[in-house]
Image (cartoon, rainbow, N blue to C red):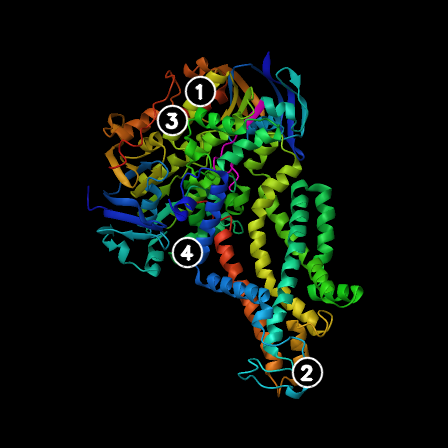
């Protein structure tokens, strides 16, 4: 692996509550090359906060600290809001869970993609149009000219998410953070959307951080997996090695999932007290 | 175990303790906002002043002393005297009773009426909604003060009629809010669950929808109180509200207008009272909004 | 006797018909699943049986008796429903105790305190949760409360609308175990709506695959486990789940 794209050392995210500050990410470290990293965890594990803190999207009074948060030689924590805006979208992009809330309802799909592009790059008008059509093609939208003229409410959830991906990838970022990109979609559409992300990330040699609660999905689409629980990474392994996971939490998660050919009469349940301290 | 622990207990032992604990949390959250504390203090002072007016006021509010007309503020007459030699401070103190009466009665009449109309319209929808809301819109489309004026003119001037007129003009806004809120609540799954258990519309509206509308209603009513005081003062000012010699603040300003250039205190002192009390209600309402807003609550 | 029978059921929302000509018979004590993607009309069928989607034609019978279009007290005591979103199905200003007592109060059933205590135990919630507000509970705990509320009237049929899809995997396992145990203990009939085929495999005896408001295929869970579904659409769903 060449020089890492992103280096995170001892990342901590905390929020104030009635009883003092509570850390939701407790000293997370990892490096990311031009590869596909999966972050898996249940709700409250801090996985989404990790993704957001890389883009400095944690709002006050939330607090992000790290010994190192370095993206291609840029110290993210040192950047001011204006510098961050130049990075967000252009160099690091993020796809969120639900396209319904991420797309502007009063702009056409084409206008929104164009906006994502020209904010970061000055291009002649005709080139912009060509790039949009090309990008919509890339996310496997048939008839991109027509779709570019539609409003977000006129497209289905799966197509909306593909449009989001087009929007996020058109400025050609080096790193894509996908936070539960398919949990709002039907199963058959999920695979389609993830295949598109996968293909584009490979072709463009980008880095990908896929954040999800779904172990199987992450193991299918990533090279490496971090399993998070209560703000800590409890397990790090290659995607293919998930079945041999060591940590009881990971093993518990795997066991708790029913399978299509279910023979167990009762599903094993995680004993949450067991690793509360780790 | 002290009272605070009992109120903040994680696992209350009774329904009463659970509700008391919730009220206490709202109260402490309110206390953290300095402006709402200020608002609360102002309202508290208003309440105390109204309750103890006979002991606080140094003179009678109506007792005339024509030898000491239009005296400027001094040690004996803190806010000066008016054109009939009445002590303005005493009149302002007694006037707090009238203001409080107006505010409370208007709130007690208009808020429940608006809530009920709005919740019924919103829950049932269809033609019930159309009739009730059509009726509401007729009231809403007329300027408040003009409508109040018309009512007072029809009913005859006087403090009671002013209260009725203001109440009649302020319920439609509450009905609108209650309806909007009911529309978002009525399709919630917890309402469906009550329907499935066999609960009728009265039970659902009274026990499930109204409690959720009340917090926004309390906020709105508190914020509107300033407006009510001003409308009452406005009616008093044009002589259709409280009648002399009642020390109503608006009426007092109206009388003082004649002397505003030479004896500024006559109109200004009751004016201050109106501003301070209005501000108090505004601050408190703002604080309540932050604390009671159902959207920000319960997502911890 | 069939717990639920649907004959030629069409359901509409406003002017659009979303469910077409459904015929289903679910035996007493059976656990039956309706599977399909969003928009397939599976939840709508559940709502119609519950009485929450009154705009239907055809016939719905519950425990051998045809039901009317709205909610009535007899049906309330026979059929109850658990909703998908544990955050939206409990009244935010009411304690757990109030939520569980309400069905008893509506039907004038006495002994409420004891019944609530017993039900909390049955769904695996400690008594100290009794006077908490929903926001003091986790998603899984809320779903337990929702199940408890549905069971307060001792119904025979439980309609489950994606009861675990909003929950974490480990919590899903707990709720699935709970549902399975309750069904065994109380002899309940389940009608489960879900898009998650492994859940069907764990909890159900039979399933109907739905697409665009119609039933495509009715199969035994044994067929599902063996990958032996007949219709191309059913096989497609199965392939997507297995991650083909």
Highlighted range, magenta: C79-92
Alpha-carbon neighbours of circle 4 within 10 Å: few (<14), some, or many (≥20)?
A: some
Measure the alpha-carbon separation of dots 2 and 4: 75 Å
Report whether mark 4 lies on the same chain as mark 3.
no
Query: In percent of the image, x 32 and y 36: which residue is there?
Result: A40
Answer with mark 3 or mark 1, whichever residue precedes in sequence.
1
Report whether mark 2 lies on the same chain as mark 1.
no
Q: Which of marks 4 and 1 is in front?
A: 1
Callout 2 touching callout 4 (CB < 8 Å)? no
In the rendered image, which residue does mark 3 sit on?
C243
Disc tally is: 4
Residue C162 in view: no
Alpha-carbon neighbours of circle 3 within 10 Å: few (<14), some, or many (≥20)?
A: some
C82 drawn magenta: yes
Image x and y of residue A43, in percent: 37, 38
Q: Which of marks 3 and 2 is in front?
A: 2
In the rendered image, which residue does mark 4 sit on?
A118
Element assignment for label 4: helix
Marker disc for residue B84: 2
């Amino acid at each position: 692996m060449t020089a890492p794209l992103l280096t995170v050392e001892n990342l901590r995210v905390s929020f104030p509550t009635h009883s003092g500050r509570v850390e939701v990410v407790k000293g997370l470290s990892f490096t990311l090359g031009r590869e596909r990293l999966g972050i898996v965890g249940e709700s409250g594990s801090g996985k989404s906060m990790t993704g957001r803190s890389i883009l400095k999207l944690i709002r006050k009074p939330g607090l992000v600290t790290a010994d190192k948060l370095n993206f291609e030689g840029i110290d993210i924590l040192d950047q001011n809001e204006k510098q961050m805006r130049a990075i967000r979208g252009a160099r690091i992009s993020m796809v969120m869970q639900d396209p319904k809330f991420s797309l502007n309802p009063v702009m056409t799909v084409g206008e929104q993609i164009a906006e994502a592009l020209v904010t970061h790059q000055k291009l002649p008008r005709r080139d912009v149009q060509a790039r949009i059509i090309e990008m919509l093609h890339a996310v496997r939208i048939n008839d991109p000219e027509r779709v570019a003229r539609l409003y977000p409410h006129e497209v289905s959830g799966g197509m909306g998410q593909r449009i989001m991906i087009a929007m996020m990838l058109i400025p050609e970022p080096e790193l894509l953070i996908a936070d539960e990109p398919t949990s709002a979609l039907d199963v058959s559409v999920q695979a389609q959307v993830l295949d598109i992300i996968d293909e584009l990330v490979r072709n463009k040699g980008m880095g990908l951080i896929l954040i999800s609660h779904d172990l199987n999905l992450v193991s299918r689409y990533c090279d490496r997996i971090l399993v998070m629980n209560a703000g800590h990474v409890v397990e790090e392994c290659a995607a293919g090695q998930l079945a041999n996971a060591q940590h009881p939490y990971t093993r518990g998660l795997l066991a708790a999932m029913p399978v299509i050919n279910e023979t167990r009469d009762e599903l094993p349940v995680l004993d949450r007290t067991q690793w509360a301290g780790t | 175990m002290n009272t605070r622990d009992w109120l903040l207990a994680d696992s209350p032992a009774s329904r009463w303790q659970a509700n008391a604990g919730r009220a206490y949390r709202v109260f402490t959250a309110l206390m953290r906002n300095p402006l709402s504390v200020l608002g609360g203090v102002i309202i508290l002072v208003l309440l105390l002043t109204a309750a103890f007016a006979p002991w606080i006021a140094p003179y009678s509010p109506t007792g005339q002393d024509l030898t000491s007309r239009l005296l400027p503020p001094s040690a004996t007459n803190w806010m000066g005297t008016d054109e009939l030699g009445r002590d303005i401070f005493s009149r302002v103190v007694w006037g707090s009773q009238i203001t409080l009466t107006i505010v409370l009665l208007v709130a007690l009449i208009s808020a429940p009426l608006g809530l009920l109309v709005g919740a019924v319209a919103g829950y049932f929808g269809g033609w019930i909604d159309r009739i009730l809301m059509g009726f509401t819109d007729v009231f809403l489309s007329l300027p408040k003060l003009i409508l109040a004026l018309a009512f007072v003119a029809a009913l005859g001037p006087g403090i009671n009629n002013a209260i009725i007129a203001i109440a009649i003009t302020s319920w439609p806004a509450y009905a609108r809010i209650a309806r909007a809120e009911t529309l978002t609540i009525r399709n919630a799954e917890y309402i469906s669950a009550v329907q499935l258990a066999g609960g009728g519309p009265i039970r659902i509206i009274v026990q499930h929808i109204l409690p959720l509308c009340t917090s926004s209603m309390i906020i709105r009513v508190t914020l509107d109180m300033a407006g009510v005081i001003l409308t009452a003062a406005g009616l008093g000012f044009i002589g259709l509200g409280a009648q002399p010699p009642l020390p109503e603040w608006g009426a007092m300003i109206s009388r003082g207008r004649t002397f505003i250039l030479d004896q500024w205190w006559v109109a200004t002192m009751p004016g201050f009272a109106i501003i301070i009390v209005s501000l108090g209600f505004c601050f408190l309402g703002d604080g309540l909004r932050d604390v009671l807003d159902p959207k920000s609550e319960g997502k911890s | 006797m069939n717990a639920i029978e649907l004959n030629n059921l069409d359901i509409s929302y406003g002017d659009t018909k979303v469910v077409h000509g459904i015929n289903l018979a679910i035996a007493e004590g059976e656990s039956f699943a309706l599977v399909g993607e969003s928009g397939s009309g599976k939840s709508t069928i559940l709502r119609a049986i519950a009485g929450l989607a009154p705009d239907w034609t055809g016939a719905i019978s519950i425990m051998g008796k045809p039901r009317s279009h709205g909610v009535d007290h007899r049906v309330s005591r026979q059929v109850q429903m658990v909703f998908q979103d544990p955050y939206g199905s409990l009244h935010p200003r009411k304690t757990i105790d109030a939520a569980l007592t309400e069905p008893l109060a509506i039907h004038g059933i006495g002994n409420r305190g004891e019944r609530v205590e017993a039900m909390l135990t049955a769904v695996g919630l400690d008594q100290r949760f009794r006077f908490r507000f929903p926001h003091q509970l986790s998603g899984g705990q809320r779903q337990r409360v929702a199940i408890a509320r549905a069971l307060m009237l001792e119904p025979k049929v439980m309609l489950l609308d994606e009861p675990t899809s909003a929950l974490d995997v480990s919590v899903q396992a707990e709720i699935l175990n709970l549902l399975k145990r309750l069904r065994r203990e109380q002899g309940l009939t389940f009608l489960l709506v879900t898009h998650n085929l492994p859940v069907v495999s764990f909890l159900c005896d039979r399933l109907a695959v739905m697409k665009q408001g119609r039933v495509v295929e009715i199969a035994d869970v044994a067929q599902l486990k063996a990958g032996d579904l007949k219709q191309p659409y059913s096989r497609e769903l199965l392939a997507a789940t297995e991650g083909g």
